[in-house]
Image: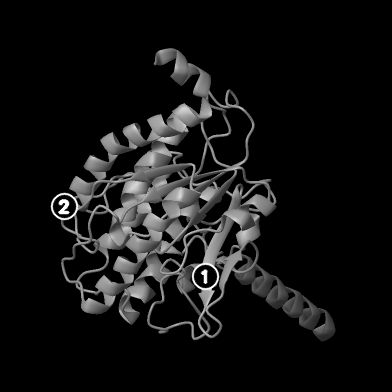
Amino acid sequence: MKRINLLLLSFTLLAFLVSCGSQRPHPSPVNDSLTVDWTKVDQKPVPEIKDEPVSQIGPVPLENEGSFSNKKSSTEGTYKDVPRALVLGPGLYRVLGQIALLKEMKIKGFKPQVILGHGLASIVAAYYAFGYAPDYIEWKFFKFINSLDEEKAFSKGWLRLVEKNLLDELKEKRIEEGRLTLIIPIRDRKSGRIIYLRRGALKSALMANLDHKGLISKKYEPAFTIALFSRSNLKKIGVQEVFLVDMVTDGITWGKGSGFLNGIFEKAATVTLKSTSKADIMMTYQFSAFGLDEKKKIADLVYSSKKQAIDHYKKINEKLNPAKSETKD
């Protein structure tokens, strides 16, 4: 009898323990928009952008503006099939003006086969090559510029903010993975040779494109004080026409510049002028009223660039459709 009572007591205790274990609170599911159940999706989602301003002057990207739409523009494919390269020249914060041209190109349905850029324009080129919409690229740059506070251009703190706020979505990517052929020009500090990178880690190549003082890379530095592009190298990969965007020859002014920076961009202006004869189209922005490092006038610069971009695209359209241009004349 005692044995039976002992067995009943054991079963009762065991049932009680199981009951307590089943009543333990389960962790609540994570309610995070960036958490994705990879078993239920077949492609990486576009990062969510909340519909709220990040500053008093910057634009806010529209819903689904993170990347290009899969729908083709009504005018896409109407131009003769000639491989073309778009070269975005250096210009520090002025490079936001180049984004207006990318917007105009998107509206008209034109996309180059190859894109390369210098300085901050290399980051514009990289985002564009990976399929990010121009509005989104503009938003990223506004967000970055508004984070700078008093950091001086090309300082170590400035470079850290570039890496943190501008390259966050590109840091794991490789140059060759873009939707368009992306080229990142860099210069070997020791030999002085310019290397036009088409493969390799994207982030390190972009950072080298901004590191004038060797603060991060002891091996590589920006190439734009020597050359903007190599016509012969582009020809080797099939490029027949080169469209160059110029941000510096109209005049170099600074808000908080220095003799060092002035020397760099004066060389860039000279190199850009020499490149005119090598390009099929030269598109120069009239930005002398805007300092290269001027942050307060960025909104005015972007506004001015919109009208200029329309005029610049007319040059591209004349090149793409020479017969229509002759008929107009």
Q: Locate residue 272: give its quadrant.
A: bottom left
Query: What is the x, y in percent for residue 276?
Result: 42, 50
Q: Locate residue 156: give its quadrant.
A: bottom left
The local crowd at label 2, few if under 14, some if 14 to 19, many if 20 or more residues have their Cα within 10 Å, is some
Q: Which mark is residue 186?
A: 1
Question: Does the image show residue 121?
Answer: yes
- At numbered mark 1, what does the secondary structure look like: helix, strand or loop? strand
221 and 37: which one is in front?
Answer: 221
Residue type highlighted by circle 1: Ile
Q: Residue at x 68, y 46 (%)?
A: 238
Query: What is the x, y in percent for residue 268?
Result: 36, 64
271 and 200: which one is in front?
Answer: 271
How many angstroms separate mark 2 from mark 1 (CA)?
Answer: 29 Å
Judge from the rendering whether residue 13 lies leftward or rightward of residue 327; answer left or right: right
- At numbered mark 2, what does the secondary structure look like: helix, strand or loop? loop
Sequence-wise, which precedes: disc 2 or disc 1? 1
The correct choice, above or below, for 238 with respect to 227 in the image is above
Q: Quadrant of the N terminus?
A: bottom right
The residue that mark 2 highlights is 289
Query: What is the x, y in percent for residue 143?
Result: 31, 57
Residue type highlighted by circle 2: Ala
The local crowd at label 1, few if under 14, some if 14 to 19, many if 20 or more residues have their Cα within 10 Å, is many
